[in-house]
Image (tube, rainbow, N blue to C red):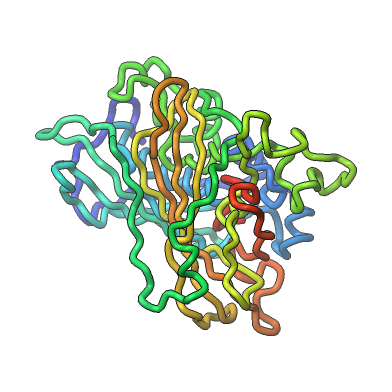
C-alpha cells in the first residue's frame, strides 16, 4: 500500500506488471459502511428480506459505486496519491453478497503518452469463491514522472463523442442528443462524505481524509474520489421508493420527506441511479425489461467540498434489434454529463458517464426476477423530462 507522499513514477512502471492481490471479506458491516459511504438507501443493498423477496437473490448485494470504489482503492494503493484517474470502466457479471470473500487482481496493460501526459492503463477483476469472476474493470490514470513532474489538474473537459450504430433504428433517431433538464444531488459535497467513502472501502489515499496533507498538495485541499460522481448525485434518504410515494417498504403509511423532489428554488432532486439515467421517454418498442451491461466514466477536474453536482442525460446510441440469451431487444447507450456548481465561480463540466443497457422482451422461462444478472429489472415509468429521474443509486449492481 502506498503511504502519503509515496507514489510510483511513470518510468518505474512497465506493461505486464502485476498488482498484488487484495482480499476483502464481505459482511453485514460492509453493507452498512456502503450505505454510509454512498448514501444509497435502495433496500436491495442492505435489507436481506427485501432483496430476497423482490429479486430472488440469496441476500442483499454490493452495488455499482461500491465496486467502483473498491477498484479505485486497489489502483490507488499501488500507484499512490499523485496519480489521477482519467477514465474507468466496469462490467458486473455477478453478485457480491454478505458472507463472500472478494479477491481483486490487476495488471498494467498499457504504458503510453497522451498529448505529453504520462499515462497507464490497468486491467482489473474481482472474484469470489461462490461466484467466480463477478466483475471486470479498467482504469486509465495520469502519472507523475521524473521528466514531466507532477500530474496537472485536468481543465477544459469536453463531453466524449459516441459513434452511432450504422443501423440506428428509426424510433431512436429523435432521441439522439436530446438532454434532460438538470437533476441535482440531494446534498453538497462535504469532507465528511468524502471520508465516509474512504471508510467504505478502506481507501488510504490521504487526499480523501488528511486535510493538512491535501492543502499542501497540488490540489490545494481535499478532493472527492474521481469515481464517486454518482455518490454525489444521490437523492434524499426517503426518496428511493418504487413508486416514489413508498418511502419505507415496511411502513406504507410513511411518506417521502421532503414530500416532493421539486424544491422551492426550482431544483429537481435526484433519487435512484436507474431512474435518473432513464428519466427521458426512452424505451425501445417491444421491450419490458432491461439489464445494465457496462459503465464507463471519464473525468475532468475533481469535485471539492462545497460543490453541488447536477446531471443531464441523453441517448447516445441504440442498436438494431438483437437476440441474446435473455431475449430479443436493443442495446441502448445513455450519456450522462456531470456539472459542478461551486460556491463561487461558474458551473463546470467535470465528467461523463456512458451506461450501456440491454432493453429486451424476455422469452418464456428466461429473465425472471433477478434473471438478467446484475441490474436486471423492469424499466421505470418514463416521467416528464427532468422530473422522472434519480441519481446515483444502483447501476449495474442494482
Q: Residue at x 65, y 59 (%)?
A: 382
* Rendered residue at 25%/57% (across/down): 109
Foreground of the two, 29 or 182 = 182
Q: Position of residue 148 (x, y in %)?
A: 13, 34
Q: Quadrant of residue 280?
A: bottom right
In this image, 358 relative to 272: left or right? left
Please give the name of the residue rendered at 71% of the width and 42% of the height, measured from the top-left corner. 239
Of all residues shown, which one is farthest toward the right? 253
Count the numbered circles shown: 0
| Image location of residue 276, percent across then percent down | 59, 50
Residue most extreme to the front = 174
Q: Which quadrant of the figure has residue 105?
A: bottom left
Occupied quadrant, residue 271:
top right
Q: Is residue 336 above or below residue 129?
A: above
Residue at image location 41% in from the left, 56% down from the top: 137
Q: Residue 96, can we see it?
A: no
Q: Is residue 289 visible?
A: yes
Q: Position of residue 139 (x, y in %)?
A: 34, 50
User: Which quadrant is home to the N terminus?
Assistant: top left
Amino acid at each position: 500500500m502506498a503511504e502519503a507522499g509515496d507514489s510510483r513514477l511513470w518510468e518505474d512502471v512497465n506493461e505486464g506488471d502485476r498488482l498484488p492481490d487484495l482480499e476483502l471479506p464481505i459482511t453485514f458491516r460492509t453493507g452498512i459502511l456502503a450505505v454510509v459511504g454512498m448514501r444509497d438507501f435502495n433496500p436491495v443493498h442492505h435489507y436481506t428480506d427485501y432483496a430476497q423477496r423482490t429479486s430472488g437473490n440469496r441476500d442483499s448485494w454490493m452495488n455499482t459505486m461500491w465496486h467502483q470504489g473498491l477498484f479505485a482503492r486497489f489502483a490507488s494503493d499501488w500507484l499512490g496519491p499523485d496519480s489521477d484517474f482519467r477514465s474507468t470502466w466496469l462490467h458486473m457479471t455477478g453478485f457480491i453478497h454478505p458472507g463472500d470473500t472478494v479477491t481483486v487482481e490487476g495488471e498494467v496493460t498499457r504504458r503510453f503518452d497522451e498529448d505529453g501526459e504520462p499515462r497507464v492503463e490497468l486491467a482489473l477483476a474481482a472474484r469470489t469463491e461462490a461466484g467466480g469472476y463477478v466483475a471486470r474493470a479498467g482504469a486509465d490514470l495520469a502519472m507523475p514522472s521524473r521528466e514531466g513532474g507532477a500530474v496537472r489538474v485536468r481543465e477544459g473537459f469536453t463531453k466524449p463523442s459516441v459513434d452511432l450504430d450504422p443501423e440506428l433504428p428509426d424510433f431512436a433517431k429523435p432521441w439522439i442528443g436530446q438532454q434532460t433538464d438538470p437533476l441535482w444531488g440531494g446534498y453538497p459535497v462535504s469532507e465528511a462524505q468524502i471520508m465516509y467513502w474512504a471508510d467504505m472501502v478502506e481507501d488510504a489515499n490521504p487526499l480523501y481524509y488528511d486535510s493538512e496533507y491535501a492543502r499542501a498538495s497540488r490540489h490545494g485541499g481535499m478532493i472527492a474520489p474521481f469515481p464517486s460522481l454518482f455518490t454525489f448525485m444521490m437523492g434524499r434518504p426517503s426518496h428511493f421508493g418504487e413508486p416514489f410515494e413508498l418511502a419505507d417498504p415496511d411502513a406504507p403509511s410513511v411518506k417521502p420527506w421532503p414530500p416532493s423532489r421539486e424544491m422551492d428554488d426550482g431544483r429537481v432532486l435526484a433519487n435512484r441511479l436507474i431512474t435518473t439515467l432513464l428519466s427521458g421517454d426512452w424505451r425501445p418498442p417491444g421491450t419490458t425489461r432491461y439489464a445494465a451491461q457496462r459503465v464507463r466514466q471519464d473525468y475532468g477536474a475533481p469535485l471539492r467540498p462545497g460543490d453541488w453536482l447536477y446531471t443531464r442525460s441523453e441517448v447516445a446510441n441504440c442498436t438494431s434489434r438483437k437476440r441474446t440469451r435473455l431475449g430479443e431487444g436493443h442495446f441502448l447507450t445513455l450519456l450522462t454529463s456531470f456539472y459542478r456548481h461551486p460556491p463561487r465561480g461558474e458551473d463546470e463540466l467535470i465528467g461523463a458517464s456512458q451506461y450501456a443497457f440491454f432493453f429486451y422482451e424476455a422469452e418464456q422461462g428466461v429473465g425472471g426476477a433477478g434473471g438478467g444478472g446484475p441490474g436486471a429489472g423492469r424499466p421505470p415509468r418514463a416521467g416528464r423530462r427532468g422530473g422522472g429521474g434519480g441519481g446515483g443509486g444502483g447501476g449495474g449492481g442494482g
